[in-house]
Amino acid sequence: MPDKARLIPIVRPCMDEREADAARRPILAGWVTQGPEVAAFEREFAAYTGAEYACAVSNCTAALHLALLAVGVRPGDEVITVSHSFIATANSIRYCGATPVFVDIQPRFFNIDPLLIEEAITDRSRAILCVHQMGMPCDLTAILDIARRHSLPVIEDAACAIGSEVLFNGKWERIGKPHGDIACFSFHPRKLITTGDGGMITTSNPEWDKQFRLWRQHGMSTPDTVRHNSKEVIFEDYPALGYNYRMTDIQAAIGREQLKRLPEMIRRRRSLAERYVELLADMRGLELPEEPDWARSNWQSYCVRLPDGCDQIRVMQAMLDGGIATRRAIMCAHREPAYAREPWSCGIAPGDCECPATTCARLSQSERAQDCAIVLPLFHHITDEEQHKVAAALRKACAV
């Protein structure tokens, strides 16, 4: 068994006394739920991404759910997306009673293949939900061209992509401006910046931003911050069905400190990714991740495709036995037991599809990515020695 105390983890949050001190502010102030720290975090996040509006929520799944509701996704609709993503992407569509229509990915970049989107559009299509997988921006220019021609809103699942950039209309711009209609972010501990958990929604649409703020707090017409600061008695009402999707001030205070660190985090991640290239470029059969000319990744994860003939589980176990944690590549929602019961589509009518329940010929690149790739350790404080150890262990595991 590996020595857990000496294990090189897949990720380790970049936090210290600055975040601990930040958390003291709301704790000592006595206002710990959604309040002034959340409002400040929203302003600072919007300024960083270049968005007009930013609304903090409890997690990225909540963000995706509210984004889909805002653009009008309802029961019976279809949303075009990828199976090759964390299951929350597909789940958020099902929360609306809609059906995910899965499109395959580009094998080089692990993102939705724009060339396959148009054939998936039907008269029930209501949105395109694209994913910036592992921090690598997808081809927004191509996706938006298709979406605009078909009058479909675009939601960006930017859970992993804070700080990533895309070349858009000749300028480098940060993911989250947004370039589609709405972008959704995660602050889970595996992301570059973390609040323990949490999410953010950015948009340029003021009416949608108002809806997000109403929905996230039970549909409450008057926020508790307004009621508590009022010199007159105010009774709130609940004009819409809402949700408990709030972020706390403790989380937001931590997020504000994390956001200050982000530029240095990204510089460090890009340097670490370049180091992996130096260490692994000559390994026969191993496919390293790459950036398209129009994208700059934050390198939230470093995912490699194993040489042909290498068994994914065996390689991962060998590395774990050597004290190195890895993860399988991104899952495919359509292969999960839940989606043997939940409706989904690959663009073929259910009665016409002859694929087994856990595989789909039209999603072959997604399935290959899940089965033949692994994610290597990458975090801010990983040392040069640890990266050498990871590279050596991967070589040894693949040579057996």
Image: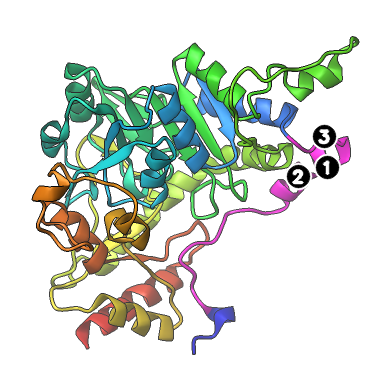
Rendering coords of residue 2 (x, y %): 49, 86
Rendering coords of residue 37 (x, y %): 71, 31
**Res. 81 image quadrant:** top left
**Res. 213 image quadrant:** top right
Tell me the quarter of the image containing the C terminus.
bottom left
Residue that carries the numbered disc 3 in the rendered image: 31
Give 384 or 341, whichever is nearer the viewer: 341
Q: Which residues fall within the magenta stretch? A: 7-33
Q: Is residue 131 left or right of residue 107?
A: right
- C-alpha gap between disc 2 and disc 3: 11 Å
- Residue 274 shows in the view: no
Mark 1 is on which residue type?
Ile
Residue that carries the numbered disc 1 in the rendered image: 27
Q: Is residue 250 left or right of residue 180?
A: right
- Nearest to viewer (mark 2 / mark 3): 3
Residue that carries the numbered disc 2 in the rendered image: 23
Circle 3 Cα neighbour tier, 10 Å, few/some/many (<14 / 14–19 / ≥20): some
